[in-house]
Amino acid sequence: MTAPPATRLPPTRRLGDVHVGDELPELAIEVTPTLVIAGAFASRDLTRVHHDKTDAQARGLQDVIMNTLTTNGLVSRFVTDWAGPEAVVRRLHLKLGAPNLPGDTMKLTATVRAVDEGGAVVSLEIAGTNAWGKHVTGTVELVLPKGV
Amino acid sequence: MATDAKRKAELEEKLRDWVGADAGSCPAPDVVNGQMIRHWCAVMGDSNPVYQDAEAAKNSIHGGIVAPPAMMNAWTMPPFVPPWDDLAAEATDGEQELHQLFEQYGYTGVVGTDHDMEIRRYLRLGDEITASKVVEAISEEKPTPLGLGYFIDVRWIFRDQNDEEVGSLLFRTMRYQPAQEAMPVSSAAVSSVPTRLPPPKGHDNAWWWEGIDRGELLIQKCSACGVLRHPPRPMCGECQSLDWEPEASAGSGTVYSFTVLHHPQVPGYEYPLVVGLIELDEGTRIVANVVGCEPGELQIGLVVEAHIEKVEGGMKLPFFRPAR
Ligand SMILES: [Zn+2]
């Protein structure tokens, strides 16, 4: 275990702190060949188009493209970075569009679209935009601690 | 063409058997473990202590280390079986077999388009996960900006060592016949953001595109029976004559039908993308984008007029706008 021990957990946003229309701070992800390939391997996805440029080009792409699981991991990190360590991701509903290619930058943005007091669920509309357009759009549902 | 149609029918016959079929069961080769979590968090830049810091995790609502939720399907990805070549490799489950079937029929392109995952509980160290997969649906062949393709919906159910469901996933992928030639090697991929696909100009249709380049919307007219046709083709469907002549269209018509594309979004096009089937006043129909009005305002029967406009990349295209 190399992570430094934490004396206490950083705070998590409470349901009462979150309002419809709140915007998350933008997160820019630099897409590098290393990120694409390491992401494919960290998710155990050996599909060649995610690590083999020759294969990607034979399929009409310019370079290796980020796999879906890496996108999911980045989106999940983006929302929990904002919400705090005890926010629980309940649903990731993502639509994939323009590929994430090395050399590009993906900007992640999100807006609170709904707050369900009863279930303590916050729905975020998220988007990841690169030079080609929308790489990912969709909804993430988070369960937050109740109260303020 | 005949063999293409025959091949397609043959493929679709095989695809019918796949809908509802068991696509395999993948037991995770490893229990949920700290090493894989650490690799994942390093790549994602995720420093949430509940994934790696035992002390902090113990004091959290989880009561101990949990795996990042988005890793759910990483645990149960199919094992690595050399050689890595998709076609040469022995399929390790039904889903791979289905993908190989598409490869064999020339649908070599693959993209994930939708990923809808529900997480019932976070996974803990030592959990043994198995995914069972079912092919829920396969679409009919659809034209997409990437090429002709099929959408495949696979439902994954994740269960733990006690056979409790811990999550589920609906993953939609598209298999397509790439419409584009492989792109040249470019070190700066992003410097060449793609524009609209240029039309393939051949012996039978180049004249039509040359008309567009001059600013003329042309229609093909049978010299023998006078019937108009579009898109350009060598033979008259009415009288089988091979003689034809171009006729200039005035460019006015009505919306015969239309569709609005929202997803997937492909570079080079603006969304929502309205694709109209326009009935020209001269009496034939043409597919083109309808612009200059909100998709919601569009109606069948709307009177429209053609405008030939330059798009990114220098190519000219006919667009239709509501008539004034
Ligand atoms: Zn004729």
Image (spheres, coloured by chain):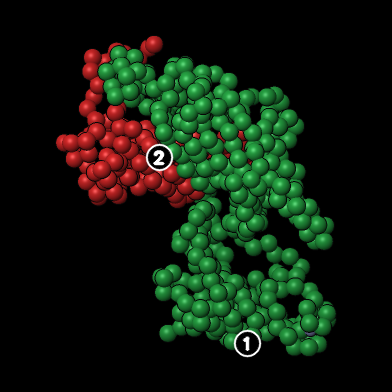
Q: Is residue B314 left or right of residue A79?
A: right
Circle 2 residues within 10 Å: few <14, some 14–19, many ≥20: many
Mark 2 residue's CB less than 8 Å from ligand 1: no
Which chain is displayed in green in the rendered image? B
Label 2 chain ID: A
B239 w.r.t. A26: above or below: below
Which residue type does callout 1 highlight? Glu
| Residue B50 at x, y percent in the picture | 33, 22
Q: Nearer the viewer, residue A45 or B54?
A: B54
Q: Which residue is mark 1?
A: B282
In the rendered image, the quadrant that contains the C terminus of chain A is: top left
Residue at screen point 22% across, 27% down: A11
Asked whether the viewer can see residue B96, the reply is no
Q: Quadrant for ligand 1? A: bottom right
B141 w.r.t. B103: above or below: below
Asked whether the viewer can see residue B228, the reply is yes
Q: Quadrant of residue A1?
A: top left
Q: Which residue is mark 2?
A: A91
Residue A71, numbered label: none
Distance from label 2 to label 1 (Cα)?
53 Å
Residue at screen point 51% across, 22% down: B161
| Residue B260 at x, y percent in the picture | 50, 65
Q: Are marks 2 and 1 in contact (CB under 8 Å)?
A: no
**Chain A image colour:** red
